[in-house]
Image (cartoon, rainbow, N blue to C red):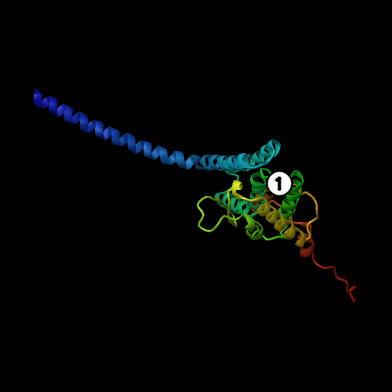
């Protein structure tokens, strides 16, 4: 009887192991199917979270933040529904990272962290903000290279090898700045003078420039998806010249 009980226990243990193995196998299959069915949902959620974090850390007004998130959510909804392919999704991310949105965000962040909180006078801050916006406009319109951001911010660069710095690596931008509290007023003034000089050299109008961030994001998405209308000058360049020979 004892042997029988031992045999039953052993059989029970073996059966239990087999059942557990079968359950694990089934769970793995279900898990694989679940991932295959839900990867778009997970990717969409990850993108939403990333954009939400970036927007929350920006200096954008609350209304503009909502509009930017609405554009981002509209695109992620299309992706989640399968209306955007994985290749198109990647192209959109590439277009956004290489568009003027990133450098504009960087410059705006510098203005918020370094200029607004500095000891400069209200007049100096307002004038500096205007010239920074002109610089951003030049970058946006392709009249100023994104690489100029490194030159313009040179007066507030962190010393080489410094561990206490603000590292900005976004798209084509790679700059390392001093902490805002370590920047002297005269260094800020030189930084702002550099921005003004670049804007002046590029012929940017001497006026404050406001960016519609939601439209910038929508434009980048539409260009990547091939939905953007060609610019007027591009349409003109591709138009066949009229035949002025008169047929004779």
Specify the farthest residue to the top: 1
Q: From this viewpoint, is residue 81 visible?
A: no
**Which image quarter is the C terminus in?**
bottom right
Instruction: Give percent across and percent down for residue 24.
Output: 33, 36
Most distant residue in the bottom direction:
248
Residue nearest the observer in this picture, 213 or 73:
213
Identify the element where label 1 is drawn.
loop
At label 1, counting other C-alpha atoms closer than 10 Å, the crowd grade (few under 14, some 14-19, many 20 or more) is some
Tell me residue 13's x, y (percent).
Answer: 21, 30
Say which residue appears at 29% left-offset and 33% top-offset: 20
Residue at image position (52%, 50%) is 164
Residue 162 can be seen in this image: yes
At which x and y percent is residue 37?
Answer: 49, 40
Indicate whether 209 appears above or below 245.
above
Image check: 43 left or right of 219? left
Question: Mark 1 — residue?
Answer: 120
């Amino acid at each position: 009887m004892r042997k029988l009980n031992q045999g039953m226990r052993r059989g029970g243990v073996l059966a239990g192991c087999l059942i557990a193995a079968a359950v694990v196998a089934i769970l793995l299959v279900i898990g694989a199917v679940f991932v295959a069915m839900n990867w778009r949902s997970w990717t969409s959620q990850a993108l939403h979270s990333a954009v939400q974090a970036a927007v929350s850390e920006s200096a954008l007004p609350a209304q503009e933040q909502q509009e930017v998130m609405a554009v981002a959510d509209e695109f992620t909804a299309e992706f989640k529904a399968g209306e955007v392919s994985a290749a198109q999704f990647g192209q959109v991310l590439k277009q956004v990272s290489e568009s003027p949105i990133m450098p504009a965000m960087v410059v705006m962040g510098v203005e918020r962290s370094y200029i607004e909180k500095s000891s400069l006078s209200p007049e100096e801050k307002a004038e500096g903000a205007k010239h920074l916006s002109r610089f951003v406009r030049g970058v946006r319109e392709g009249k100023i290279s994104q690489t100029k951001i490194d030159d313009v911010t040179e007066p507030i660069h962190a010393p080489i090898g410094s561990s206490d710095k603000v590292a900005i690596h976004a798209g084509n931008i790679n700059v390392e700045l001093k902490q805002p509290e370590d920047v002297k007023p005269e260094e800020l003034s030189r930084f702002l003078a550099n921005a003004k000089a670049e804007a002046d050299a590029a012929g940017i109008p001497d006026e404050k420039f406001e960016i519609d961030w939601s439209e910038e994001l929508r434009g980048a998405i539409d260009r990547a998806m091939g939905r953007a209308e060609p610019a007027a000058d591009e349409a003109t360049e591709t138009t066949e010249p009229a035949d002025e020979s008169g047929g004779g």
